[in-house]
Amino acid sequence: MFQERYFEDYALGEQRQTIGRTITETDIVLHAGQTGDFYPHHMDAEWCKTQDFGQRIAHGTLIFSVAVGMTAGTINPLAFSYGYDRLRFIKPVFIGDTIHVQVTIADKRDHPKRTDHGVVVEKCEVFNQRQELVLVCEHLLLAQRRAL
Amino acid sequence: MFQERYFEDYALGEQRQTIGRTITETDIVLHAGQTGDFYPHHMDAEWCKTQDFGQRIAHGTLIFSVAVGMTAGTINPLAFSYGYDRLRFIKPVFIGDTIHVQVTIADKRDHPKRTDHGVVVEKCEVFNQRQELVLVCEHLLLAQRRAL
Amino acid sequence: MFQERYFEDYALGEQRQTIGRTITETDIVLHAGQTGDFYPHHMDAEWCKTQDFGQRIAHGTLIFSVAVGMTAGTINPLAFSYGYDRLRFIKPVFIGDTIHVQVTIADKRDHPKRTDHGVVVEKCEVFNQRQELVLVCEHLLLAQRRAL
Amino acid sequence: MFQERYFEDYALGEQRQTIGRTITETDIVLHAGQTGDFYPHHMDAEWCKTQDFGQRIAHGTLIFSVAVGMTAGTINPLAFSYGYDRLRFIKPVFIGDTIHVQVTIADKRDHPKRTDHGVVVEKCEVFNQRQELVLVCEHLLLAQRRAL
Amino acid sequence: MFQERYFEDYALGEQRQTIGRTITETDIVLHAGQTGDFYPHHMDAEWCKTQDFGQRIAHGTLIFSVAVGMTAGTINPLAFSYGYDRLRFIKPVFIGDTIHVQVTIADKRDHPKRTDHGVVVEKCEVFNQRQELVLVCEHLLLAQRRAL
Amino acid sequence: MFQERYFEDYALGEQRQTIGRTITETDIVLHAGQTGDFYPHHMDAEWCKTQDFGQRIAHGTLIFSVAVGMTAGTINPLAFSYGYDRLRFIKPVFIGDTIHVQVTIADKRDHPKRTDHGVVVEKCEVFNQRQELVLVCEHLLLAQRRAL
């Protein structure tokens, strides 16, 4: 499960895809409980009927957290996550939707200060079962460079 | 709990602060369970002892999700969240740390396409009990403009 | 979120209403898990079909706890809860029912021993989506009196 | 587990005692998540240090719910719970405290309307590991009378 | 709840039956979260539609753990569990199925080393609401012998 | 994550090892909640002080379920689990212990009825941070044979 990968080992355009996971009512209730966000958009089925989307929707932070978790496979001891850019909630995820994530190495760049590391940008795209893009973000991975 | 606020009602520099919340071992175990991320950084106290940070650290997505949830107070039916920019994990959060969030209206701008809405940028800064900044992000709120 | 209110600041008849929350199968399973009450009334869908109410019902303590939690808004550092009177389970709450709570200041009275505090009685009425009263109780709040 | 008991079968003064259960940080975090009550009294260890009680305290509704669950043993198909009287939070319960419950048949009385049932009053007393009374309430059980 | 039973007190063929419990989507999501097993068999409703069983199935370890928990009634301080033999997953358990457990004293034998204890074999059979056997195992209980 | 492996692809003596996971108080509380087993061995810290082991111990089914989950890596669509043999609880696991699992292909044999499948026996050994064996079992995997 531990697998060393240097900055140089990541190839632009490289792609991997996760298996799927169905987002359940349970996930939403647990996420409300973890975060304290009990907004009616997620928790009040009656109020949701009066809204455009017509039913309860998953928290944006739930889909983001689950999607990130779904991409957590092998552990690279030479890299660590330091943030995300351009996280966008494109479409609502409803109870019963099944999501999967596609990760693409979208960019590789120097780090402004740390010359012994480079920044690997993983584009994460989350799709539902209708292949609609529901969430997108760019994961910033700081990966060690191979010593010269 | 519902309170209407138009784009024009948000003032640059406006600030609010949440109460605090202690991040517990329970939060980490529940977040691993919700996301499927059982990386040893969060779940293996023995392995962590051999690392620089010396102890288990909270998932980045946990602190982000909890922080966002902590800012969820009154509901503005005229606005909705459409994403986050520049999410950065500045410092690790350990079991027993207590965080609070400071939200500042950092920017207001036009939306490229929707002329009846404007973008409100809320800068969210998460601090621990030593007043160290641990996480920062920019919340993008799409708020309806007052009809002319 | 902290807001000081003295005994004198509570007005008889004052009323507030919470937003709604749908009671889910998840809530019941989690409450059984928290309390250890796995009675078939809550956990055995087959047995419930043979009973008058025909389906699983939420634990009384679940609806009470959630309802009390739903009324937890601003924190009054000058008051604290010391109990409840006349808690009654009026009607069963089923999976999928959506409840909200109405709180009315129903009484204000002296405390037998603590002359620097007074007792504020909050009547909590829990309604389902059909506006049927499902639970009622009286919350006893001990609130500091203004110094003379 | 099902055991029929008529109103006449309950004896005044009859007493039973549950085994013990330690109230953990996990219980408090789960209860906050279930109820949405994230008050700093339960969730902010730093703030609690500045208060009289000096540490986080369990929600009143948590101790009440757990205590009620602890008394749920055999199921009497001839009786049902219809409420509680005089629920009082006598002392705070801290993380690590171990509680048990003593149930005493404290009263038996007619029901104002239902002549085929009687009201059995179970006094529930919750003690901590120092044998201090921390919570008390009266459980109202409506039990069927034996047909004449 | 504590009840002393010596090895000699267990009678071959003795039988008890638990009440029922419905296995919910919540149970599966919680079990995935507890164990880290997010296999699509349990978590991906879309993928399951393409499989023989057509829908999500409960983890074998979930049904085993819940079944064992359902048989946990009175505590015998003179015995302890030291393992299980011949655990078999006979039929899948689906969301909404209701299980109960039948325990039969199937064997009593000497322990190879501990002459002051004997082995009691409890055959645990788990049935669904259609009375189909879904899981079976043999629980090995080491029970103290009466002193001579 | 899906990787086809036929019966013939499993080699006797083949071995793999999981990363570690610390068993927390949270895990025990959640497992009690999932299974309904609130025995004082797991839930009553005061009572445990009076026993030989001196502190709360994890449920056997918890360690078994977590260990099985820890071995769930790649999914073999040509095989499925049909049971476990000789599951033994060798040593107690305490709160704060860190376990890992070692899986060894210990046996390969014909299935009495299904000639197109063979039985692969995975010996699972669970160790704590002191390299003490705490649990052992034999996992029975029914794997498809390569067509001749």
Image (spheres, coloured by chain):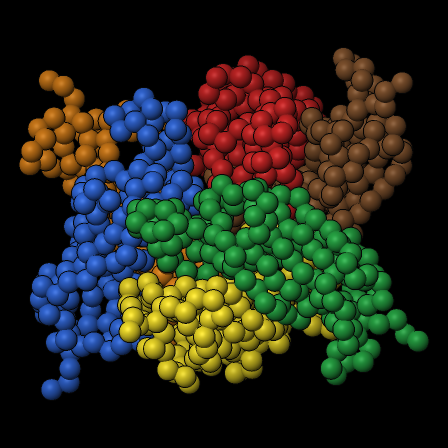
Chain colours: A yellow, B green, C brown, D red, E orange, F blue
Q: Which residue does the image show at 70% across and 29% down from the upper left?
A: C81
Q: Is residue A84 visible?
A: yes
Q: Residue furthest right?
A: B148
C144 sits left or right of E74 in the view: right
Q: How many marks?
A: 0
Residue lying at 56% horizontally and 18% vertically, measured from the top left: D133
Quarter of the figure with residue A41: bottom right
Residue A46 in the image: x percent, y percent? 72, 61
Residue B79 relative to residue F139: left or right: right
Name the quadrant of the C terminus of chain B: bottom right
Please name whichever residue, C35 or C14, is drawn nearer the observer in this view of the structure.
C14
D48 vs E106, nearest the viewer? D48
Who's the residue at 52% across and 59% down the image? B89
Q: What percent of the width, then of the height, locates residue C7?
A: 84, 27
Answer with left or right where residue C25 lies relative to residue F10.
right
Question: From what the image shows, is residue B23 above or below residue A73?
Answer: above
Name the residue: 79% across, 44% down.
C102
Task: Tell which residue pokes out farthest to the left in this image.
Answer: E112
Q: Position of residue F47 (x, y in %)?
A: 36, 24
Towards the viewer: F117 or F16 = F16
Q: Is residue D121 visible?
A: no
| Vertical position of residue E99 compared to residue A21: above or below | above
D74 is higher (above) or lower (below) than A146: above
Where residue D47 sits in the image (x, y, percent)?
62, 35
Q: Is residue A132 above or below residue E40?
A: below
Residue C86 quadrant: top right
